[in-house]
Amino acid sequence: MSSHADYRTAGPAATTGDLVVLGIETSCDETAAAVVRLDAAGAATVLSSIVHSQTVDHAPYGGVVPEIAARSHVEIIAPTVQRALAEAGVGWDGLTGVAATAGPGLVGGVMVGLSFGKAAALARGLPLIAVNHLEGHAVSARLGAEVPYPFLLLLVSGGHCQLLEVRGVGEVARLGATIDDAAGEAFDKIAKALGLGYPGGPALERLAATGDGGCFALPRARVGEKDCDFSFSGLKTAAFRQAQACETDQDRADLADAVQAAIARQLAERSERAMQAWPHDSRLFVVAGGVAANRTVRAQLEAAAGRHGFRFVAPPLAYCTDNAAMIALAGAERLARGEHSDIDAVARPRWPLDEAAALARPSSGAGRKGAKA
Ligand code: KG4
Ligand code: ZN
């Protein structure tokens, strides 16, 4: 279970009335700023959410280049924040706090957003909340719908693949995680082997729509394992080999379809393990992260949820992929509990949500998106 040791208690005054929080997100290749209002009843309203994607800057390199990302964040952060405030119709004086991602992620980028947040908080006399990016994803479904705690969360993106028991903000237990690549990373790398551009996941989904993967035998990882961990490296190696043997566009489309089906199946199978062991009466299954955009993945997860009596919620895509509204909401929920961070909060390339589980069972090393959690 994650701890509150990273936060200070501000006192009961912080817990009353509406909170209007500026969120800043710069942990990977999106420069994002948002303003979110959290009312006393716990309902969130997104007043603005600006996301500047750097995809075009990184596309020539086939993946995110940390140095380019950090420089780009520096150039765009100030106008992005100004736009978020302007679209929200809120001035600096209308804010009750500033929340910035403090990790995990590419540390150069994290430092840009966190430093900007610290400067704004200091200059305006506002509390700073240094937010764990994963905590943002964990609360993201609460931006678009009424999503009561507790819920089972599958966080599946380019940098993360985890199953989490979310009991409240800051009260998250990791049930399982990938022991090698994240699912989005597998999509991206296999897409690259098939000659598709970056980001590969959406391109692979488009190609798969014209294929039939039935003729490909790809390895099935972790079948029969009782835990909730994932593994995509065997699939990736086999897909690389088969991609080299593809001779026609139809072969490549068929392989893309087989890969997509294999990833979706494993995500559903491991999620079902977590559903079988779920200890709460309230049965709600939330999926977040960029891979949740994949229709085959969504369909398999929804079917799995249905089999186990879970309601299925996928946040709108704008809040599935990296954004600052989720960071603002995580910060506001902390603030509502009277918590804030010290102004010397550090940028953390690695920051597992569930420190105890991460120490007991460390997952793999750094991936395409930098440090994993
Ligand atoms: O959440 P996100 O925007 O960024 C982080 O990784 O934090 O997720 C991006 C990932 C990439 O790996 C991308 O290829 C994958 O999500 N993705 C998809 C699809 N759309 C995005 N993967 C498969 N099918 C998609 N339609
Ligand atoms: Zn993310």
Image (tube, grey):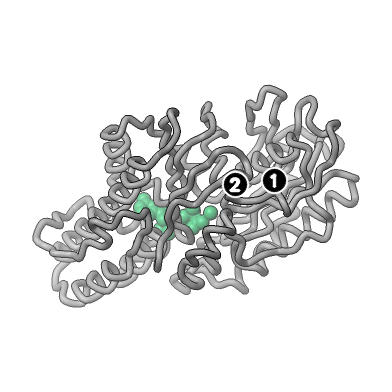
Task: Say how many tags the image has.
Answer: 2
Q: In which quarter of the image is residue 217?
A: bottom left
Disc 1 designates what residue?
23
- Label 2 CB sits under 8 Å from any ligand 2 atom: yes
Q: Quadrant of ligand 1?
A: bottom left
The residue at the point 28 percent across, 46 percent down is 296
Q: Which of 207 and 20 is in front in this view?
A: 20
Give amino acid for label 2: Gly
Look at the numbered disc 2 and give the secondary structure of its residue: helix
Mark with earlier residue (1, 2): 1
The numbered dot on residue 56 is none
The residue at the point 43 percent across, 28 percent down is 281
Q: Residue lying at the far top in this picture: please name it.
A: 41
Disc 2 designates what residue?
136
Look at the numbered disc 1 and give the secondary structure of its residue: strand
Q: Is residue 207 visible?
A: no
Residues marked 1 and 2 touching at CB (< 8 Å): yes
- Residue 118 on image: x %, y %: 81, 55
